[in-house]
Amino acid sequence: MNLSTVEEESSDQNVHTPTEIDWHMLDKSKFFFLGAGLFSCVSATLYPVVVLKTRQQVSSSHLSSLRTAFSILRYEGLRGLYRGFGTSLIGTIPARALYMTALEVTKSNVGSTTVRLGFPEPTASAIANAMAGLSAALAAQLVWTPVDVVSQRLMVQGNDYSNSKISSSLKSCKYMNGIDAFRKILNTDGPRGLYRGFGISIMTYAPSNAVWWASYSVTQRLVWDGIGSYMCKKDDENNENGGVVALRPDSRTVMAVQGVSAAMAGGVSALVTMPLDTIKTRLQVLDCSDDNNNNNGRKGPTVGQTVRNLVKEGGWMAFYRGLGPRWASMSLSATTMITTYELLKRLSTKNQENLIR
C-alpha cells in the first residue's frame, strides 16, 4: 500500500481530502520545467525580505526592519533590495531541482516502507515527510551554500555598519557582480571559501526542513479534522434525519488549508533555527579582521568567535536580529512555496482526471 495513491477520508467527519500526488504519478519534464518558472517568480517576490534579514544579521547595531528598508531605498534605491538576485536565481534553479527530486523520491519510498511496517497512516505520513525534508535539505545545500556565500556578499555591499571591524571586513573587497565575487572568493580562499558555513547550514536547514515537513503534515491533518468536525456539527443541526453528508472541498478550500498549515509550520521553524541562521550568515559574509585571526592564518572567523562577538554586541538577543523579516520570509515563503508546489504537482500529473478538483 502507498500513502500517496489513495484518497484519504476521515471516517468520523466524512471529509474527502485531496489525493496525495506521488513521484511516479508526475510527468518529470513538465514538473521541472514548470517548477523553474514558478519558483523563480516566488523567489523574485520574496527576495527583498531576505536582503533585509541578511543585513540585520550582519549589522552590529539593532535597527528595525522598516528603518533598514527605508535606508536601503534612500541610499541605494530599489536595486539595493535585489543585490545578488541574479546569482541567487541562477543557483536556485538546480538547487530546487535537487530539492524536489530528493523530497518526492524519499517521501514515496519511506511512505511505502512505513505503511508496510504497520505504522498507522498519520504516523507513517509524518515520518515520510520528515525524512523527505531532511534528505532534500542535505542534497540542495551542495548547491545552495556556494550560492548563499556569493549572493549574501553582494547583498551587504553598500550597507553602512556602525561597527568598524565589521565595516572594514565587508569593505575590504568589492564585487562587481556574481561572477566577479565567485572568482575573487575562489582565488582568495579556494573552494573552501565557497562552502564557508556549510556545516552549520546543514545543522540549520536539515532539522528545520524535517521539522517543517513533519509539522506541515500534522497541521494539515488537524485543520482538515477541524473542518470536518465543524461541518459534521453543522449537518447535525440542519439535518433532522441525521443523514451523513460527505464533504468534497473545492480547490480554493484546499489551497487555503495548505497555506495556513504551511505558515504555521514555517513560523515555528523560523523561531527554533534563528540563532543558527544568524551564525551561518555571519560566517558566510564576514571576513576575519582582528589580529588574533591573522596570526593564526585564518581567512574567516570560527563558530566560537562568531558566537562571542554576537554576545558582546547585544547579548543573546543578538542571535535573534532579523527575526521579524525571517519569520515573515519563512511564513510567506512556506505559504507560497507549498501552494505553488502543490499546484505544480497537479499541473504535472500524468492523469489529471483522477484528481479531486
Image (tube, grey):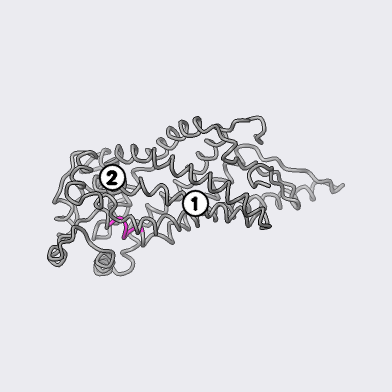
- The type of residue carrying mark 2 is Ser
Can residue 16 be seen?
yes
Relative image position of residue 90 (x, y in whole percent): 33, 37
Marker disc for residue 3: none
> Is disc 1 surrounded by few (<14), some (14 to 19) or many (20+) residues within 10 Å?
many
Can residue 233 be seen?
no
Residue drawn at the location 46% of the way across and 50% of the way down: 331
Calculate the distance from the C-alpha at mark 1 to the C-alpha at mark 2: 24 Å
Residue drawn at the location 37% of the way across and 40% of the way down: 92
> Is disc 2 surrounded by few (<14), some (14 to 19) or many (20+) residues within 10 Å?
many
Labels 1 and 2: the sequence-earlier one: 1
Marker disc for residue 133: 1
Q: Is residue 72 above or below residue 26?
A: below
Q: Are marks 1 and 2 in contact (CB under 8 Å)?
A: no
* Quarter of the rendering containing residue 79: top left
Q: Which residue is mark 2?
A: 151
- The type of residue carrying mark 1 is Gly
The residue tagged with tag 2: helix, strand or loop? helix
* Quarter of the rendering containing residue 97: top left
Q: Is residue 228 above or below residue 82?
A: below
Residue drawn at the location 65% of the way across and 46% of the way down: 2
